[in-house]
Amino acid sequence: MVQNPQDVAPKRGNAKQSVGGADAPPLSAERVIEFLRQHPNFLCENQDLLDILITPGRDSANGVTDLQQFRVEKLRRELAELAEARDALVATGRGNLTVQARVHKAVVALLKARCFEHFIETLTTDLAIILDLDVIIVGVEQGEIGGATPPAAGVVPLSPKMVDRQIGPGQNIVLRDNVTGDPEIFGPGAGLVRSEALIRLSFGRAAPSALLAFGARNATHFEPGQGTELLSFLAHVVEISIRGWLDLPE
């Protein structure tokens, strides 16, 4: 039996059809992206689609879109980002080498001190120049080292528990940016201090708590998260030197 062509031809205009079947979820950007990732050669196999797609590439004279230009621009951006990261890394490395050289020079200057007073003077004046700082202070709680009055200018008395309040119990170093210097620590130079490094000093079990304070007028000279190895090393040199000059037991 021959059927009427109108009976077998698909009806148009009334029936709604969806990609993937009647029960498939609505088409979305996420599904398109997922499909293209699973079929990376889809556009190569269906190049006619390139005539209707809006792409970030360039058009040739015959209307074919050049996707290679998009890939080139993407690679250029990635290379620029890598170059920027490389330059930042090199700058950081050079900065670290500069700081390391300054700390080495500071240690040599301290080792040349002829007496305790000269040591403190070198620490609080010469090292400020060498390290490009504005104020360096040694603070000792209750103003005593081994039960005596501070024997040199640059050694300031601190109130009891001041070290723990400033640095924190169990902590050895704290870096702060965008601060106002504490007059009890930095004295007349407190007005210059906009960033600081405070390092706990230990002169022995019988000695009072103390700290080494570095202050800078640059608000970001010291910042939380910076490396502290060189500062800790310098503070350790100061500890050993003061203990030796004052003959303090460990």
Image (spheres, helix red, strand yellow):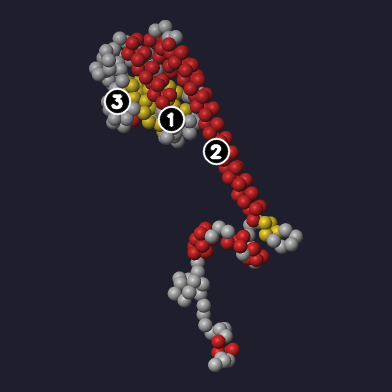
Q: Quadrant for the C terminus, please.
A: top left
- Residue to which mark 1 is pinned: 227
Secondary structure beneath label 1: loop
- Residue to which mark 2 is pinned: 85
Amino acid type of the residue that numbered disc 3 sits on in the rendered structure: Ser
- Most foreground residue, 66 or 138: 66
- Most foreground residue, 120 or 104: 104
Which quarter of the figure has residue 64?
bottom right
- Residue to which mark 3 is pinned: 159
At a point 39% along the width and 24% down the height, the residue shown is: 232
Residue at the outermost top position: 114
Amino acid type of the residue that numbered disc 2 sits on in the rendered structure: Ala
Amino acid type of the residue that numbered disc 1 sits on in the rendered structure: Gly
At a point 42% along the width and 35% down the height, the residue shown is: 225
Nearest to the eye among marks 2 and 3: give it.
2
Precedes in sequence: disc 2 or disc 3: 2
